[in-house]
Amino acid sequence: MTGVIQAAAKGPSARALRHAIMLTTALTAPAFAAAAQANDTPAPMLMAQAGQHSFNIPAQPLPSALALFGQQAGLQISAHGDAVRGLNTKGVSGTLSTDAALQQLLAGTGLSYRISGDGTVTIENPETGETESGAIKLSPILVEDRHGLDDHAGAADRARSITITQQDLERRNPTTVKDVFAGESSVSVGGGIPLSQKVYVNGIEETNLAVSIDGARQNNKVFHHNGTNFIDPALLKAARVDPGVAPADAGPAALGGAIVYETVDVDDVLEPGRDFGGFSSLSYETNGETFIADFAGFGRAEGFEVLGYVKRADGENYDDGDGNEVVGSGADLLSLLGKAAFESENGHRFELSAEQVNDNANRPFRANIGRLTNRPAQVVREYDLTRRNFTFNYSLPSATGMFDPKVVLAYSETTVDVPEPFGSEGLTSSFSGKIENDFNLSEHDIITAGIDFYDDTAEYKDPGTDAQESATNGGIYAQARLQPLDPLRLSFGVRGDFQEFEGIDGSTHDNSGLSGNVSAEYDVTDFLTLNAGYSNVWGGIALAENYIFDPAWDYSGGIDPVRAENLTAGFKTLYEGFSFGANIFRSDFENARDPVWGVSPSITVDFETEGYDVSAGYTWGPGFVRATYTDTEIEVDGQATNSDATQYLGAPLGRIIAVEASHRFDPLGLTIGGTIDAALENTDLSNNAKQEAYESVDLYTEYQPQAADYLTFRLEANNIFDETYADRATYGQEFANVVPLYEKGRSFLIMTKVRF
């Protein structure tokens, strides 16, 4: 850490530190001013008693409603599990004091509440436990906003999970996947154009993780000049990243962890007490003269739900921080989402979802870089990228006993057509599904068991070529999540997979393997928790990238299936609004497939990533500030490497800093906030190459008039210091002959949103 502090005091990184201090000071000042005016009354208590907040909590199970209440009121909520389990609330809506809102939320439940001196709200049951004046204290569990989005939130295998909630997404207003993970230094997204963005978790590229959208497995390795999972973040209600160690029920080939995306449902957007509604927004961004318009309509009647959404983005090329036009960077996006669901009176829920995202525009000739200085060539060419996702889900959302089933059946596909110069067409697809059941032995002890499958295909066509690889996999798994002692949570699981791989030449290769994982989380004190995890994962044979398929490939020598070993350990603290945490991680991959056109389909390499991350933050009533720092190194076959040698493996990221802060002035309906994305110089590369340091600062303000709370106005100032930089996860920036795909220079965005 001493080296980190010394490095941060010099050069460009010093500017990043100054910007972080400026942002933190600006956003924490209102909170400390309020505390100073409160004399002897603690600031959180003053806010809890005197402040009014805008609440929008529909009728739902009480635990998830309490999580939303804590988020919207800016307070920590504690409740004993036995007190709230199985209870429902009619919800609460409007601008109310904390006391008035709690009274409405708990009406008819028989529960009471108390607000402690530090502002914590504790929910109690007077009939089963004594109140604060009694000798008996209930053992509280923290009700966090993760609950209701994740059936297994709080389990040991979620100890290091990064959960992006609907409130996070509303605050960040993401236009790209990079924005979704703003403020998270351990998740990097490179590429200034959404079509070329890739996600890296602790340095591992997302094709080495189990990625799903609404439960649908994603198999999107098409063209190395494109991104891997092209997603419109406006469709999302939540995202979760399980870095390194993933549970057995995350799905097959969760080699370096998992990423779970969930799109919005009717319950997420429908106003309380209404059966029909909708929203529409219009935004304009100055750099690139980009217009974004979207519209959604949804409704619910007699157990049926319907939702439809459409979005269109159109704009010109943007300029980088030096004022140079980034050719092929204009916005051209069409996004569609449709959902239909039925939930019976006895709780059975059936849901159908269809989603499509399309980008059909001229992009840089190699879409993930600006250009090559030593290869004069066509500047741009047409890329037509479409990703489709279709899912069927069945579940019993309110089940608490031994029968708690889930069924998923899904089909996803990604196509990349590049008409010039070869008339190339690439298609990857995955037909997948699972049947599983949660055996709820108790509130804290759950065993999940199930079977799953996938049938993946990758195909490339041009006038002279038609080549295809495919893989079919069947898996069986079980994951136990137990709490044998009050301060101890354990999670351990095993899965077996059986795969049949077929090469371009029609040869088949059968393989099978076992995977196992174990995680533990232990509460040392009320404010200190330790965690550790280990996994050994078999991943089978991965399909090659479509655009390097060679009809002459010879598979007779066989291909070794990949296996990964992951280790994590760390701690986290939470005390009176302050938080701090640190983790170490390491992932070792053996026989990761790395084929080469014209050479062999069977080439494999070993690679490893390792590093550590630290985080610190402070939450005060209606605001927070949080900073994260991650240091990651990657080696291939034991040697330092670069972003070219690590395609579909990972990326050399080095040291990354992320800061996020926000404060809401409830009486005014005004929110201010911002993020900092920065990286220190990285020299841990082959051939003495280096990646330059940078920092980018974004600020925003959002206003919701009390007299017209159906309206929202937002103003953003992004990259306010006009930094010229390529995000650390962007390909090729360490090569002298590569002009990387630079991020957008200074830009202003205005947005208006109306709900009806």
Image (cartoon, rainbow, N blue to C red):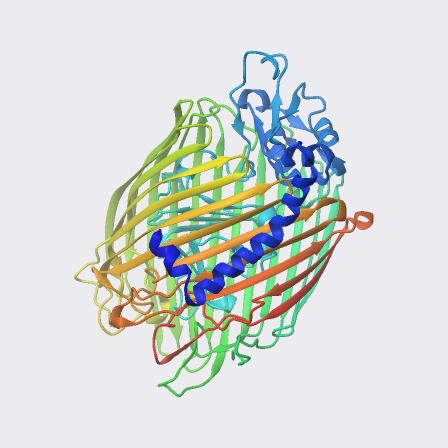
Residue 636 percent coordinates (x, y): 24, 61
Considering only vertical position in the picture, is 339 above or below 102? below
Q: Residue furthest right?
A: 707
| Pick the front one: 9 or 574 | 9
Q: In the drawing, does residue 170 fall left or right of residue 375?
A: right
Quarter of the figure with residue 430: bottom left
Residue 241 visible in image: no
Considering only vertical position in the picture, is 374 above or below 697? below
Q: Residue furthest left?
A: 557
Residue 89 percent coordinates (x, y): 68, 28
Residue 386 percent coordinates (x, y): 51, 65
Quarter of the figure with residue 734: bottom left
Q: How many marks?
A: 0
Q: Residue shown at 46%/73% (left/top)? A: 741
Residue 583 percent coordinates (x, y): 37, 44
| Pick the front one: 239 or 100 | 100
Considering only vertical position in the picture, is 660 above or below 602? above
| Pick the front one: 368 or 70 | 70
Residue 642 visible in image: yes
Q: In the drawing, does residue 245 fall left or right of residue 304?
A: left
